[in-house]
Image (spheres, rainbow, N blue to C red):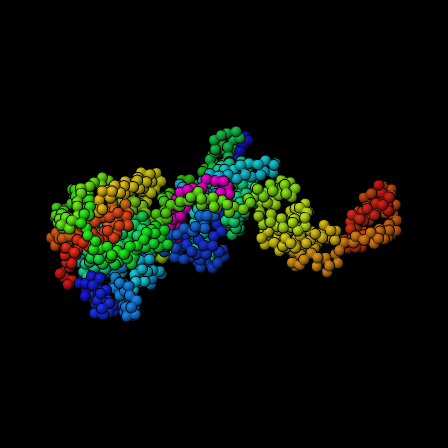
Amino acid sequence: MQWEVVIGLEIHAQLATKSKIFSGSSTAFGAEPNTQANEVDLGLPGVLPVMNKQALNMAIKFGTAINAEIGKRSVFDRKNYFYPDLPKGYQTTQLALPIVGLGSVDIELKDGRTKTIGVTRAHLEEDAGKSLHEDFSGATGIDLNRAGTPLIEIVSEPDMRSTEEAVAYMRKIHSIVTYIGICDGNMQEGSFRCDANVSMRPKGQEEFGTRTELKNINSFRFVERAINVEIERQIDILESGGTVVQETRLYDSNKNETRSMRSKEDAMDYRYFPDPDLLPIVVTDDEIEAIRKTLPELPDAKKVRFMSEYKLNAEDAGNLTASLELANYFETVTKEIDDSKLAANWIMGELTARLNKENLTVKSLPVSASQFAGLLARIKDNTISGKIAKDVFDTMWNEGSEADSIIESKGLKQINDTGALEAMVDKVIADNPNQVEQFKAGKEKLMGFFVGQIMKQTQGKANPGQINQLLKKKLGSS
Amino acid sequence: MHTKTIAQLAAGLKAGEFSSVELTQHYINRIQTFDNGLNSYISLTEERALAQAKRADERIAAGKAHVLTGIPVAQKDIFCSDGVKTSCGSKMLDNFIAPYDASVIESFNNAGSVMLGKTNMDEFAMGSSNETSFYGPVKNPWNVDCVPGGSSGGSAASVAARLAPASTGTDTGGSIRQPAALCNLTGLKPSYGRVSRYGMIAFASSLDQAGTFTQTAEDAALMLSVMAGLDVRDSTSIDEPVPDYSASLNNDVKGLKVGLPKEYFADGLDADVAKRVDDAISEYKKLGAEFFDISLPNTHLSVPAYYIVAPAECSSNLSRFDGVRFGYRCEEPKDLEDLYKRSRGEGFGSEVKRRILVGAYALSSGYYDAYYLKAQKIRRLIANDFTEAFKQVDVIMSPTTPTPAFKVGEKDDDPISMYYSDIYTIAVNLAGLPGISVPCGFVNALPVGLQIIAPYFAEAKLLNVAHQYQQVTDWHQQMPETFK
């Protein structure tokens, strides 16, 4: 039987506010445990929450970015359950009346298709603290620094039909939240993470199959792998005549498997009710429009502009605009050297490869856009060859120096002097009569040998185009 | 000195008749002499009080005094007070030293008043007799076999016995007005949102409101002036101007339109209590007030609605008492579940557990609509009843309680009957209105209270109406013989 997967994602994006959603404590990552938890975060008797307006505005900004309905009147609810890292015994979240209602985003697929994915809702909520199980022999440590950090949970419609679509959707949401500056998008620190709802149905069937929820997936690679292994697991069950159990499963990236956390029967009754300590949030049309006006150029619009302004194809434009930093980098470089093709090739080639190799993002790139433009400018004006440029780039990356000074100090300037090159060509021809004879007899592959000899002599600095031309002329090749 | 009102004490301090240190020491002595039999205080903060009194004397000498500077006040042990045990009447918080001041405590500190100590109360403010306290029951100074009412029983008993000139309380379903009535005091419950709840340990967040116990409405005006106002730390506190509550006390009540809701004078009201209330009505008539029969048709739903909403909120509010970060933790927990179960099982008393269970049930999936949601709708109906009534009348009057103080232990096995002792006060909380109870006579040597209810934020009117009555009656001046 042919199976079709149905996927919905719940993405948690940590809002980039300075202070927590209901207290004045800092949200900075990595502080000593419990140094960023005041009486409100600790849930001391008598404390009360006060909503951080900035968090609200960020949520609204997200809503406007995905053309969603904004809840004119939204309400915080309490989700009641006991856990040591949940200080109040309830999480303050939004259930019935979220701040962001129905919206959508478009994703681009490898085959060139564009697909619209519905966003059911996005709501504001507070994060919990962390339980630390190491270093406390026989006991558990609690760090409440993260408790009360503002999140938006972005819930998609079950609109995705492949792992590729799920990854593309997650990337698109990541682009949007980082573009509009409401989330730093840092997945290692948990600022952007997702749960995936996965179910299978026979292709052509309308009705959804039973779904499982995969918890806490914190990278694009893992979302792909987690869903793939879950698809296989469910197909195995269904094809051997079994039924999928509705449950929550944890993805273990080390073993690349999902395993059961709790079944539907064990599901807790969270006893949701409106938080009486917080007033309903009322937002006016004017406030929404004022926030909408602060939206920057969004990824989709930037992509279209890159295609027309820089004559890039859809794929290149899509790649360059996936991250705002990369897009800005590209634009800076392009403007300095006035050559979008060269900039695009080098940024998506050498630069991206190096970033991936070192596991860095554009933000932590050691070579600034103008330094990088300095390098490309020397390629463009033939001062160095592309091959030499790779070595210069390597030095720039490691030492942080400018392209020109590296070229100067290492004497890497390309030899473009036709006279000098002609002398070298003559010498190579004179020194290698056998090869010349063979070449003339038709073994044209030997052209590479002659070029190689000259490059060897010049340590790669000879202008390869000119050498080729000269050789062809001297050897009488067609 | 202890027979004086705040207004008289403030005048005495200003005139230099006595110092705040002398005054404070006088009350400390009285507490040490009399409180063993009453149990109205959980903590006496003697050293801190004398230090505050000394500073108050300096402030008075420097001419920078507020009316309440140097005035001793007893604080209900529900308000967090920095560096002082804040127990909320519970074993759960017997070891809890609050690391910060509640907004109310801060306000009194800023005014320069002196905190004598923290008063006894029903555990987590759940009770109408002050018998659920971990620290034992409080006795009614008018008859120590009787309860003082609750939950602010300690606050009421301390002022009734003149072991403090005034005290703070909290009122979720009548917890100020009912004990004020039972102890012959003026008990003010302001509008919801009038006084910040920050640092006041939550029982039912949408109903809780801080207020005062005083001998007179004049004193209540002084106290409220200190406590009222917007606090950005409490999202439910309301940005409504705070008038000078003392300024309007002497306004004439001639032509005042008073509503008498027939539902508050129906079956269940003690006949003698009804007579005392009638006497009070006659006094007001002499002052020129006009009375109208009105109806608050949804009154019968107020107790059932309250006993869904309040427990539901409390079941969630009390989740933070889990033995993890502060408060009581059971010995040698086996695992996390054991830690939760035994810490809460051993730390909470039976009334608190009863309400947590009721509340958790009312909120559970499948029952939410039938209970919590319905109760919230009833709440709206009850509030609408009052809104309609206030289109016809300026204030509403009723008995505060159906009977005078009952005996200690009398309602131990009958929580429902206990719950119905708040039948005249609960609707006011559900609607969020201000209410006051003023002494209006005695039945078998036990005090009776008259309740006056006003529209939202009409505390000035309420205090004015109460004050005018106290100008022509002396019930509020009576004090129990034993404590003179």
Q: Residue at x 25, y 41 (%)?
A: B388
Magenta residues: mostly which secondary structure? Answer: loop
Question: Where residue B328 sits: x, y (%)?
Answer: 33, 57
x, y percent for residue A70: 45, 41
> Observer-nearest residue: A262 or A37?
A37
Image-quadrant location for residue A300: top right
Left or right: residue B342 versus residue A136 is: left
Q: Is residue A73 magenta?
A: yes
Please tell me which residue lies in front, A71 or A228: A71
State which region is magenta.
A64-93
Q: Residue at x 50, y 39 (%)?
A: A104
> Can residue B102 be seen here?
yes
The location of residue B375, given as percent across then percent down, is 29, 41
Q: Residue B220, how many percent across, how many down?
A: 23, 57
Q: Measuring 57% from the left and 42% from the top, which residue is drawn there?
A: A301
Note whether residue B150 is visible. no
